[in-house]
Amino acid sequence: MKKYYLWSLVILVIGTALAIFGAQNGGIKTINQEGNLLDFSRRPQIISGDQEIALVSGHSLPRRKNHSYQLTQPFQNVNLDVYNAQVVVQTGDRFLVRVTNRQALPVKVKVAHQQLSISDYDSHGAMDQDRLPNTKIYITVPASRPLNQFKIDGNDVQLTLHQLQLRQLRWDNDKTKLKLDHVQISEKMIADDDQGNYLINNSRLKQVNCDGDGLKAQISNSTLQQVTIDADTVALTCQKTQFLQHNRIQGDNGKLVFKDLNKNLGYSIRGEGNSIHYQHQLTKGNFYKRPHYQNNLHIAGDELQVFVD
């Protein structure tokens, strides 16, 4: 029994000595989340409600949500690589970009060589299950400084352009929700988009090329020049709109409604199983009306319902 107490006392003394020696030589340190020594003489760091701690590669790092960015540098081109984002572009007094995101990893925002570039983590594969827009982007450009090219690559993007002039608009997305209001595109609009949904009003678009598995669009009070639409299924409504020069729509199992189009427009509708209602008169199969006019609309597809009033 005496030996037991003796050995316990020896171990306790040795352990205490080692602890004191280690503390004096920096062996015991308390490190905060940024890897800096904590000074307990100061008030503790407060983590706000929009932050969370995440393990990344075995290290405990701060990971912020609801990032906010703002810049006022001028630019001529816009390149967005975003996923599940809401984008609004409009004219104003000066260049202004505001970006906020709900994600745990921040978006990248920069202006270089007259190009505004914005990319987020989700565009490279991360998923957000609640489907609310992760990133919100608000871009303002002066009315006297039309944009050269606006390009988007990603998925599930809600894009709104309002009172804007630009030379080119391009996007390679799936499930794009597009809204154009008082927009003028002077060169071309190119879309590679599956299941796109477009709302176009009071706009003038040139060389429109849309390709995808499905397209749904409503167009009113606009002018379209040299339109090419190639979609497996198409649902299109055009009202008080002008089609200039040669225009072509191809799709199957869709419904096309045209109301109050330009009077000098010729029609050529071809395919099997089509139902064409021209001025309330039904025609089955193929239909031709002034097909050689300078302004014409050629429609090709099967099982289409076409209404022209």
Image: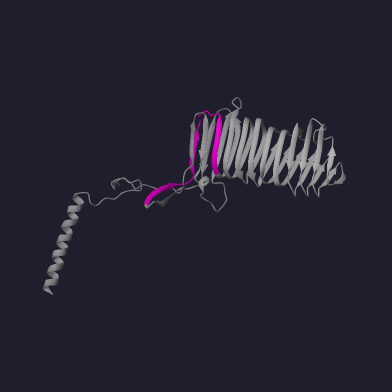
What secondary structure predominates along the stretch shown in magenta? strand
**Colouring chosen for the image of the structure:** one colour
Tell me the residue at 54%/41% (across/down).
Answer: 81
- Viewer-side residue, 279 vs 32: 279
Q: Position of residue 309 (x, y in %)?
A: 83, 40
Q: Is residue 172 left or right of residue 225?
A: left
Can residue 31 be seen by looking at this rendering? yes
As drawn, which residue projects farthest toward the top?
144
- The reply to whether residue 47 is visible in this rendering is no
Is residue 63 in the magenta section? yes
Horizontal placement of 233 versus 39: left or right? right
Quarter of the image where one finds residue 173? top right
* Image position, residue 90 (x, y; %): 61, 33
Name the residue at the bottom extreme: 1
Q: Position of residue 128 (x, y in %)?
A: 53, 51
Residue 100 relative to residue 279: left or right: left
Q: Position of residue 198 (x, y in %)?
A: 68, 42
Compare residues 31 and 129 and report the one nearer the observer: 129
Say which residue appears at 66% left-offset and 42% top-offset: 211
Name the residue at 18% across, 54% down: 20
> Which range is magenta?
59-82
